[in-house]
């Protein structure tokens, strides 16, 4: 035994799958550690986030010598970042700071290093990422054992597993038998623990993790507490029912409350309550959860919590959640296209989604930044999905309710999409050897970050960066008011010069930079006050509106939103693909009116809309 050994353990759990963009203290460290304590077994966990690969051999040797584990486990929480944009950036950028997130490959290397140093030490791999496609991952990683799904039986049968006794009787275990055949035992799904999981030692480790990895100026860390398992739905893009089962089970609220009270006593104020969703249809258990959180809030002002919810929640129930310092998870709506929601097999309708967005916009607590995530880039969209979503948002002025909208695009391929009709696979991409490569859905390697992009978009935009820019345009200009901060007055002159448009005069620029107070009914007053005096401004507005077929409001303002502006331009100038062609058809525009039009186009992204016109013109 090495001279470094000072705290031998039964099980050493290592994590090479922490997403650097959002460091999270692995909840597996908490849960598996608690399971081992329940069975009187010694446990240690180490996260390798931030450790350069060149140091892994030395760090692993030190850990193995110090803790002399009987078994080494590898937690594979996720097999990639689940965000195609990360791999697009990595493929187009050779900077070290833009290295791709490849936890499967990193875990494989770590297993090999452990084997080199301690060949007889048994290894096992588990985690929700591993559970989605356990057999291909097991074959690639080649550990001694794997655990697919819940790991409750691992600690309970730890000695039997290491000694090779009755392996076929251990639920969820994957192993190689004496003939070399890989065997996967039947899946079993367990309810959440009936005991508390956190201890002062775990809290100390959690604090040390966030002190090292998190931005202290951002906010206090959000701590996970499980309240339920299982999901009864079959959304095409989600593997939760595979990993946790389709039967919903709730953890005892007495145990959950005891867990929360202990954490609050340790200074924790922000909580993520872990479950597939708070509100499976017809289940009002979430109101009991909210009542518990409200009671804790009354005793401990300042605590807040979050969890996933489905958008068919009732208005009074959402209001009740907000009253308990609930914070939305920003992952609640796919799109506002009925056909798309049906094809994606989500359990809510477009009416649910619209009502939810209206409730969210109206009820969000004062001071809470209003943002939303839409998965309008899913592979089940049609040519009409973006426009239908934008039309609903325009109709209810929801764009004015959200400071930011993130549009997710690209669906992760897990390897079983051929049977479920995931997509055509014509636009699948796998990240390998630092670049993106074409990949078909039915032959995708689940060990690689592999995604399908929607055919509707990639058939029109063959450049992947342009696909990314299109969805950013949708989020900023159609689904939120983020565009108001995207293009400021300081970039207007350069924008005009790049397009060969007349530059604004110093007086006009002074008007723009002045940023006047918004006029009544005006969406963007900056576009309405750049030409001079009030009478002149009104004259230009009339001239401009008449030329484009827009009706002025009673106060002389232009009562439009971005979608209305785009549709008006598309209809009036069906062949126009850029701004100069539109201006050529408006010789009657005065110089001031032309500058007005240029500013409007710049501010409201009309140049971008013309670029993506084919993707916005479907009915």
Image (tube, rainbow, N blue to C red):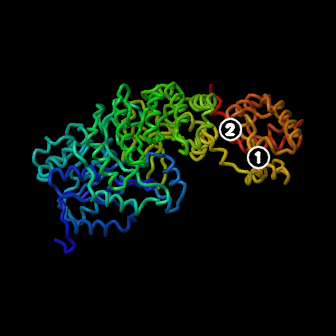
Q: Earlier in the sequence, mark 2 or mark 1?
A: 1
> Percent position (x, y) of residue 91?
51, 53
Closer to us: 10 or 129: 10
Mark 1, other Cα within 10 Å: few <14 / some 14–19 / many ≥20: some
Look at the image and tell me in which quarter the N terminus lies: bottom left
The disc label shown at residue 609, or none: 2
28 to the left or right of 551: left
> Percent position (x, y) of residue 419?
37, 31
Is residue 448 in view from this perspective?
no
584 to the left or right of 259: right
> Percent position (x, y) of residue 213?
42, 61
Is residue 171 in view from this perspective?
yes
The disc label shown at residue 379, or none: none
Task: Measure how far apart labels 2 and 1 are at the Cα level.
Answer: 26 Å
Q: Which residue is mark 1?
A: 516
- Mark in the foreground, 2 or 1: 1
Closer to us: 559 or 158: 559
Closer to us: 334 or 443: 334
- Indicate the secondary structure of the residue bearing disc 2: helix
Q: Which residue is at a point 32% across and 47% down the rendered structure image?
A: 260
> Percent position (x, y) of residue 501?
81, 47
């Amino acid at each position: 035994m090495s001279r470094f050994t000072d705290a031998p353990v039964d099980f050493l759990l290592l994590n090479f799958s922490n997403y650097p963009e959002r460091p999270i203290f692995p909840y597996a460290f908490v849960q598996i550690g608690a399971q081992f304590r329940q069975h009187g077994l010694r446990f240690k966990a180490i996260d390798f986030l931030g450790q350069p690969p060149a140091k892994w051999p030395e760090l692993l040797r030190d850990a193995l010598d110090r803790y002399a584990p009987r078994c080494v486990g590898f937690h594979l929480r996720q097999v990639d970042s689940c965000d195609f944009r990360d791999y697009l950036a990595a493929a187009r950028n050779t900077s070290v700071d833009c290295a791709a997130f490849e936890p499967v490959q990193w875990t494989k290397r770590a297993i090999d290093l452990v084997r080199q140093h301690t060949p007889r030490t048994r290894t096992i791999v588990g985690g929700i990422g591993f559970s989605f496609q356990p057999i291909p991952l097991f074959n690639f990683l080649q550990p001694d054992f794997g655990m697919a799904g819940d790991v409750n039986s691992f600690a309970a049968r730890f000695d039997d597993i290491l000694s090779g006794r009755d392996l076929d009787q251990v639920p969820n275990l994957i192993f190689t038998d004496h003939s070399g055949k890989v065997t996967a035992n039947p899946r079993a799904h367990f309810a959440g623990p009936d005991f508390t999981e956190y201890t002062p030692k775990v809290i100390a480790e959690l604090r040390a993790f966030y002190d090292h990895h998190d931005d202290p100026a951002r906010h206090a860390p959000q701590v996970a507490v499980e309240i339920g398992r299982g999901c009864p739905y079959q959304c095409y893009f989600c593997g939760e029912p595979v990993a946790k089962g389709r039967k919903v089970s709730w953890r005892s609220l007495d145990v959950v409350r005891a867990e929360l009270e202990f954490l609050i006593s340790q200074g924790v104020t922000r909580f993520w309550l872990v479950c597939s969703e708070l509100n499976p249809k017809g289940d009002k258990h979430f109101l009991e959860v909210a009542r518990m959180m409200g009671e804790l809030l009354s005793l401990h002002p300042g605590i807040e919590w979050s969890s996933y919810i489905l958008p068919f929640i009732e208005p009074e129930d959402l209001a009740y959640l907000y009253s308990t310092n609930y914070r939305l998870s920003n992952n609640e709506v796919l799109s506002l296209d009925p056909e798309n929601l049906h094809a994606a097999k989500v359990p809510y309708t477009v009416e649910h989604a619209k009502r939810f967005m209206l409730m969210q916009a109206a009820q969000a607590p004062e001071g809470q930044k209003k943002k939303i995530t839409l998965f309008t880039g899913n592979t089940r969209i049609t040519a009409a999905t973006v426009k239908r979503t934008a039309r609903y948002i325009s109709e209810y002025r929801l764009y004015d309710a959200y400071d930011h909208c993130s549009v997710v695009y690209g669906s992760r391929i897990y390897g079983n999409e051929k049977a479920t009709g995931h997509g055509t696979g014509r636009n699948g991409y796998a990240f390998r050897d630092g670049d993106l490569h074409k990949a078909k859905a039915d032959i995708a390697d689940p060990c690689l970050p592999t995604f399908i992009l929607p055919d509707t978009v990639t058939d029109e935009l063959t450049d992947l960066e342009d696909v990314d820019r299109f969805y950013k345009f949708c989020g900023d200009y159609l689904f939120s008011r983020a565009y108001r901060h995207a293009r400021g007055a300081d970039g207007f002159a350069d924008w005009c010069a790049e397009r060969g448009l007349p530059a604004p005069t110093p007086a006009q620029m002074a008007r723009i930079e002045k940023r006047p107070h918004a006029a009544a009914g005006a969406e963007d007053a900056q576009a309405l006050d750049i030409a001079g005096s009030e009478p002149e401004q009104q004259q230009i507005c009339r001239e401009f509106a008449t030329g484009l077929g827009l009706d002025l409001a009673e106060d002389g303002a232009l009562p439009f939103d971005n979608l209305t502006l785009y549709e008006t331009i598309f209809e009036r100038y069906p062949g126009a693909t850029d701004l100069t062609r539109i201006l050529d058809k408006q010789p009657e525009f005065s110089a001031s009116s032309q500058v007005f039009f240029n500013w409007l186009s710049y501010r409201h992204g009309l140049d971008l809309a013309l670029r993506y016109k084919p993707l916005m013109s479907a009915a």
